[in-house]
Amino acid sequence: MSALIEDIEVTCPYCGERLELDVDCTVGNQIYYEDCQVCCVPVVVEVTVDDAGDLAGIRAHRDDD
């Protein structure tokens, strides 16, 4: 198992700015909303964690995607 909290950068699907996220891998797979720090629109964040507790993938997308 690597870091429990991963520092990740994703791109806001609305304004294109980079978002810096702290992802808690101890929670496992998760879907949540994170407000963009630039345009303030809620972005859907999907996190996938593997069986070892490591971050396997992250996707940031619009609510209507």
Image (cartoon, rainbow, N blue to C red):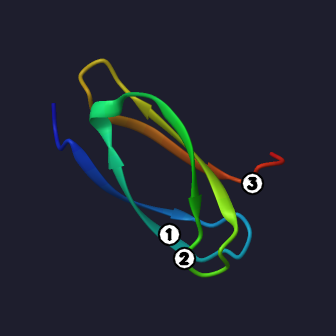
Residue at x 24%, y 48% (from the top left corner): 5
Report crowding for label 1: few under 14, some 14 to 19, many 20 or more residues within 10 A (C-alpha). Answer: some
Left/right placement of residue 10 relative to residue 61 reads: left
Residue position for label 2: 37
Along the viewing direction, whichever of 55 and 21 lies nearer the viewer: 21
Residue identifier under label 3: 62
Closer mark to the observer between disc 1 and disc 2: 2
Quadrant holding the C terminus: top right
Task: Give the residue type that dot 3 points to.
Answer: Arg
- Residue with the most extreme top position: 51
Residue positioned 59% across, 70% down in the render = 36
Q: Does residue 44 appear to the left or right of 21 in the view shown?
A: right
Q: Nearer the viewer, residue 10 or 31?
A: 31
Q: Is residue 23 shown left or right of residue 29? A: left
* Label 2: element kind: loop
The residue tagged 1 is 19
- Secondary structure beneath disc 1? strand
